[in-house]
Image (tube, helix red, strand yellow):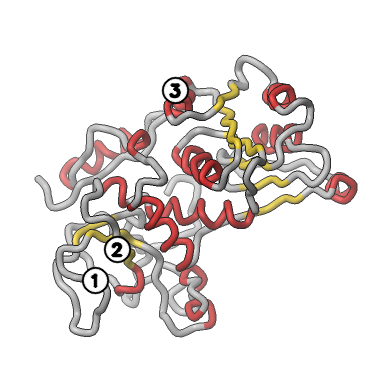
Amino acid sequence: MGLREHQGYPHANGHEGSGIVAAKGSKVSGLEIGDMVAMAYDGCGECESCRRGDYAHCVKLKGRWTEDGYIGGFGFSDYCVRNARSLVKMNKDMDPSAAAFLEPLATVVRGIKKLRVQPMETVVVIGAGTMGILNAQMARAYGARVIVSELMEKKINTAKSLGFEVVNPGEADPAEKIKEMTDGTGADCVIVAVGNTAANQQALDMVKYTDGRILLFAAGYPVPELKVDSNMIHYRRLELLGTFEADVNDFMAAGKLLSDYTIDVSRIIEEPRFTLNTMQEAYEHAAVPGMYRVSVILNEK
């Protein structure tokens, strides 16, 4: 868990996963043996948060705690038992690695809704990593013009291959470039999809002067700084928005977006794919700078 020592122990990793229903209880409806499913959040199903579909803030299980005290999704296991409410049925023909994008995409759905992206707006996404690419595709699905800001050549090429305009901060001041590309206006919205102080400052510099909106999507460790005074927010009517996790509606929307291929994740799934026996190699592969999603395929040797 790196520098994020806030999730607790004992921990059973794996909350971005998919699988095939192998067995089900007699009271389960809506799912059949053989269905492709992806993992959403779970909760007690009874508290106020759960009743409104916000399992992440369950007061009993605390989001992803299980009854026996473990935290995590148990995604790195050949078999696991889950409540039907914490599974979303997916297109049965999907690549399992693509179906496993349900949770990250659900968090993007939530953020984009909070940002209130409108058709014909200009949205800048800072960072073309996995979450930046998902945010960019979601903003485009809402009808916005999307510009991606990225330094790394591999990620620049990925963004371009998906049809996005790209600004490289290593070649030009990104805020000045965005203003040039928007006839001096600046972006209607900026999504900060990398967690660092420089990206936060760039967002403030490239958003339009009045009624601009900034979504702070990514966490960062060490904790990034955001140097903004309240007068700036007041006089410019600037909106600084935070987002984290997702609710049931977000998960259902994400499942549909993936299942009908509105959101294309094929370019952000890395090869090779690994097995449980080569898990350490998977971690080492994922730690290489510039990597997108690294998959572990279960029930394989």
Mark number displayed over residue 157: 3
Front-lying residue, 187 or 59: 187
Position in image of residue 82 (x %, y %):
28, 71
- Quarter-of-image position of residue 242: bottom right
Residue drawn at (37%, 41%), measured in percent from left and top?
265
Q: Are marks 2 and 3 in contact (CB under 8 Å)?
A: no
Mark 1, residues whose alpha carbon is within 10 Å: few (<14), some, or many (≥20)? Answer: some
Check disc 3 and give the amino acid type: Asn
Q: Nearer the viewer, residue 30 or 60?
A: 30
Q: Secondary structure at mark 1?
A: loop
> Would residue 77 appear left or right of 226 to someone viewing this image?
left
| Label 2 to label 3: alpha-carbon separation | 32 Å
Viewer-closest of 245 and 62:
245
Task: Kindly identify the amino acid type of the residue bearing the numbered disc 2.
Answer: Lys
The vertical placement of 168 against 63, above or below, is: above
Confirm or deny contact between disc 1 and disc 2 (CB under 8 A): yes
Name the quadrant of the C terminus.
top left
Mark 2, other Cα within 10 Å: few <14 / some 14–19 / many ≥20: many
**Residue assigned mark 1:** 31
Q: Residues within 10 Å of mark 3 (few under 14, many from 20)?
A: some
Q: In the current view of this chain or complex, which residue is farthest to the top? A: 171
Q: Residue 292 location, x and y as percent?
A: 38, 36
Q: Amino acid at mark 1?
A: Leu
Determine the image quadrant of residue 19.
bottom left
Q: Is residue 30 above or below residue 47?
A: above
Tell me the residue at 25%/54% (across/down): 76
Q: Residue at x 45, y 45 (%)?
A: 2
- For mark 2, what is the residue? 89
User: How many marks do you count on the picture?
Assistant: 3
Sequence-wise, the earlier of marks 2 and 3 is 2
x then y, percent, for residue 288: 38, 30
Residue at position x 49%, y 50% in the image: 4
